[in-house]
Amino acid sequence: MHVQPTPVTAMSVSTKPMTIEEYLNYDDGTDTRYELVNGELSAMPTESTLNIRIAILLLAYFLQLVV
């Protein structure tokens, strides 16, 4: 059974906490990433520019070790 609950926002009221199975099967059709906090969906922020730059730097460094 595939259940698609709506993300919990400040304006909505959740009747029951979301289960881990519901969370793992959840897809709202967007690229938004969510985490499950106390049975409620919480939208995760996008990565910062600094985080992306650090990831690229680390990738370049590790590629040099392999080559």
Image (cartoon, grey):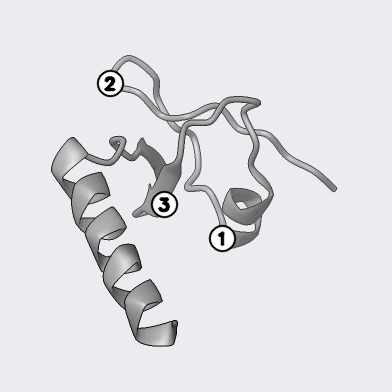
Residue at 35 percent across and 39 percent down: it is: 42
Q: Do labels 1 and 3 touch, CB within 8 Å?
A: yes
- Label 1 to label 3: alpha-carbon separation: 8 Å
Residue lying at 41% horizontally and 52% vertically, measured from the top left: 36
Classify 66 as above or below 24. Answer: below
Residue 49's spot in the image, x, y percent? 19, 37
The residue nearer to you, when weighing 60 against 8, is: 60
Q: Is residue 65 left or right of residue 54?
A: right
At numbered mark 2, what does the secondary structure look like: helix, strand or loop?
loop
Where is residue 53 shown, x and y percent of the image? 21, 48
Nearer the N terminus, badge 1 or badge 3?
1
In the image, is residue 62 above or below residue 46? below
In three-dimensional space, the C-alpha distance between marks 2 and 3, rounded to whole angstroms, equals 15 Å
The residue wearing badge 3 is 36
Name the residue beneath numbered marker 2: 10
Could you tell me if the residues under marks 2 and 3 are in contact, i.e. CB atoms within 8 Å?
A: no
Residue 24 at x, y = what percent?
62, 55
Q: Secondary structure at mark 1?
A: helix
- The residue where tag 1 is placed is 20
Q: Residues within 10 Å of mark 1 (few under 14, many from 20)?
A: few
Identify residue type, mark 3: Leu
Query: In the rendering, at what x and y percent does residue 22 appear?
Result: 64, 50
The residue positioned 28% from the left and 21% from the top of the image is 10
For this view, does 43 lie left or right of residue 47? right
Q: Nearer the viewer, residue 61 or 49?
A: 61
Q: Quadrant of residue 14?
A: top left
Dot 1 or dot 2, earlier in sequence: 2
